[in-house]
Amino acid sequence: MPPDEQDLLWLRATAQGDRAAFASLYRRHHGRLARFLWRMTRRRDLIDDTINDTMWIVWRKAEGFRGDSKVSTWITGIAYRCMLKALREAGDSGEGNVDAAALELAEGSGEGASDAARALVSEAADLELRDWLAEGLKRLPRDQRVTLELLYYMGESCEAIAAIMDCAVGTVKARLFHARMRLRNLLPALAEPGSQLPPVQAGTSRRRPPSGDS
């Protein structure tokens, strides 16, 4: 059975008080939520609390799911709003672990190269690209960075991102446009020593993201 259909069956069963179905839903989405929330903050305590708060809301409001989006999109949207609230209450800037995000983006470079010499060159280029991307992502406003990450790392559509972030599809597209433009302008400047750059956002880390194992 496709995952989306299975999620819907589990959610409907959860709405009827089926704890086993809820446990299956929790296990299915825990890792994905952990990886997504890690992009918003490096604090594992906030990530764990937010996942618990999210799934508690899912348990209480399962019956109210209208089916306007995929179950996974609905759950991610709840997690996003819970994390924003947690960050405000904690006074955390919540700019996330962008070094790990940049690593994932850079890892696809040079794929399929079979020549050893080309692999060495690609490795050096990837390291430089990773550093530039990390620096560029650190300087994006949170809304723009999260939008980029939902699209490219989480594989969400613009419509799903709009549902998750509770905004219009046009707003999502505008954020993507402005984020791309900022990165396009930032990356060349990062290659020039002494360039004037926007300040780095607080709250970055070089630790690897959580595996999401429960």
Image (cartoon, rainbow, N blue to C red):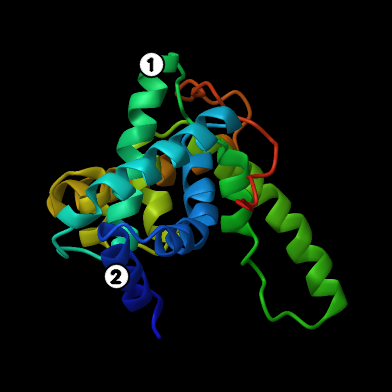
Position of residue 116 relative to residue 74, above or below, is: below
Residue at mark 2 to residue at mark 1: CA–CA distance: 32 Å
Using residue 128 as the reference point, say whether residue 138 is left or right of it.
left
Specify the quadrant that holds the N terminus: bottom left
Give x and y (percent) for residue 20. Answer: 45, 63
Position of residue 32 relative to residue 57, above or below, is: below
Task: Say the numbered circle drawn on residue 157.
Answer: none
SS for tag 1?
helix
Mark with earlier residue (2, 1) = 2
Q: Residue at x 67, y 71 (%)?
A: 110
Give x and y (percent) for residue 50. Answer: 44, 35
Instruction: Please indicate, yes or no, whether residue 74 appears anywhere in the rendered image.
Output: yes
Q: Which residue is mark 2?
A: 8
The three-letter amino acid code for the residue at tag 2 is Leu
Give x and y (percent) for residue 67. Answer: 17, 65
How dense is the environment of label 2, judged by Cα within 10 Å: few (below 14), some, or many (20 and up)? some
Task: Say the numbered circle drawn on residue 89.
Answer: 1
The three-letter amino acid code for the residue at tag 1 is Glu
Give x and y (percent) for residue 68. Answer: 14, 63
Q: Residue furthest right?
A: 116
How dense is the environment of label 1, judged by Cα within 10 Å: few (below 14), some, or many (20 and up)? few
- Mark 2–mark 1 CB contact (< 8 Å): no
Q: Nearer the viewer, residue 133 or 12?
A: 12
Position of residue 3 relative to residue 93, above or below, is: below
